[in-house]
Image (cartoon, rainbow, N blue to C red):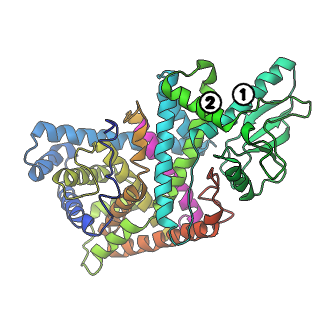
Amino acid sequence: MDPEQKDILLIDEAHSPIIEENFVELNEMINDFVDCYQQNQDRPIAQWLPEKIISVLPEKSIEEATAMVQEISDSVRIMEEQKESLAQATANGRSAESWFAERVQQVTSKMTCEETVQYLQRLDNAVTTANESLLRTITTKAGGISRNPNLDGFIAEQEHVTSFNLNAEARGSQYRAERLQNNTCNSVDMVIRDAKGKIVRRIQSKYCKDATATQKAFEHGDYRGQQSLVPEDQAGQIKRKSTTYIEAPDGTRSNPLSKDRAKELQEEAQSGKWDPKNWNAYKTKDIAFSIGKQAMKAGLIGAAFSVGADVAMKLFKGEKIRPKEVAQKALLSGADMALKTVVTAAVKVGAEKGIIPIIARGTPVGRIANVVFVGIENVKILYKCAKGEVTPQQAFAQMEETTAAAAGGLIAMGIGAAKGAAIGTVLGGPFGAAIGGFIGGTVGYMAGSAIGTAIVKARRAITEKVSGWLSRIGKKINEVFETPIYDPMLIH
């Protein structure tokens, strides 16, 4: 087993199906820990939580339990800092994707070229896997299938931009190419600008596995007014006007690139034979930005995945709920760092005792804290939506940003930095979404039955909107999966 994989949060789906029984004891554990918090809320967590952990895991020493609490507290603090950093960035007009790319760059700046490519590939694979799993789960009835982008597709687009600009410089051309970082339906991939910055060409790139797949990809979108860029080895096989290079009005062109060559560039990087001239900080940021867009899509789909929340509702249904003050405070005031710490400890203890089959023993607390963070943040957003303080569209955007902040937190903590796989925790497909949804639903009902019911209704409304939208476009999702999950023109 890959050493990086053994401590990933979630066990393989085939061995741990999502069933209600998996959550019953987890519910009891969370309630027990939160009750203890309720009784000790006037004391610092570090004074009582280690003792609570030992009462359930007597094999732990006080030193081990204290270290666990410290690690959980540090993880929650870092994620809160990332959330605040992202909030400030978006308030200043930056996108969440740009913010995420900056976090990735901070990590990769200390790596070699080979390590950087491997790290980005792991990030891309983790996001791709999460998105595919979630989309398959949500769109089973609609038949929608997701095929997310691969790193070689990003490299291909950037190679065209780079070679065009080098050729333009060599011949003294005024034109420059740019790879855009849009997140809208049918968005333009690249543009060519003149010396005044005016766009003179718009380009749509499709680097699919073969000519048939590339042709279908173009058929599944509205790309009028854009040049159709295809791999060099597929030229003449595409049943539409296309080109193998991008070209400016003065004849300046990029160098054609085949699908095989784009794949080779990726494989060369991973084998350690990467030419440093083929990589630079701009490419790192560009690819990280694209990965960030996919991460945010995973966050929204996961937020709409209601299995865990539905289980929480069933467990609390018919029960006489005595609202817990600490849960109410977290939802109403937003002061929830302590609650996140306590719930993370409960989930970690539950995993170590083996009462949660879908979470592996030995899972690092940072990964668990990440899922708890997303679950509680999302339920706070849902409650605001239920009260009419934010619209469903605003809730969608905030949930996406929550995932970006959580992923940024993992990166900031350095978890899995060498390989980048740790981001798969927060984007853990149906399991991560189910656990996060269950935790959020549990906290919601702890705040009171009326609050819990309102949150469930808000989640169902969002689930119906996202699932309904996926049903409408499911058969049109093309091979590069460029259509955003949140599009205000489609969800209304």
Side of 118 where 250 appears, left or right: right
Q: Nearer the viewer, residue 81 or 103?
A: 103
Q: Which residues are magenta?
A: 387-411
User: Is 403 colored magenta in this rendering?
Assistant: yes
Image point (9%, 52%), residue name: 55
**Foreground residue, 207 or 455?**
207
Q: Amino acid at mark 2?
A: Lys
| Residue 158 image offset from top left, x and y in percent | 68, 33
Res 12 label: none
The answer to which image quadrant residue 357 occupies is bottom left
- Residue 124 position, x and y percent, is 51, 42
> Distance between the Cα atoms at labels 2 and 1?
9 Å
**Badge 2: few (under 14), some or many (20 or more) residues near its Cα, within 10 Å?**
some
Callout 2–callout 1 Cβ contact below 8 Å: yes
Residue 13 in picture, x, y percent from top left? 35, 57
Q: Secondary structure at mark 2?
A: helix
Q: Is residue 81 visible?
A: no
| Circle 1 residue | 162
The spot of residue 481 in percent (x, y) is 61, 53
Secondary structure mostly seen in the magenta stretch? helix
Q: Is residue 66 something that shows in the picture? A: yes
Residue 308 as seen in the image, left or right of residue 273: left
Q: Residue at x 53, y 65 (%)?
A: 389
Q: Write down the residue under mark 2.
A: 283
Quarter containing the C terminus? bottom right
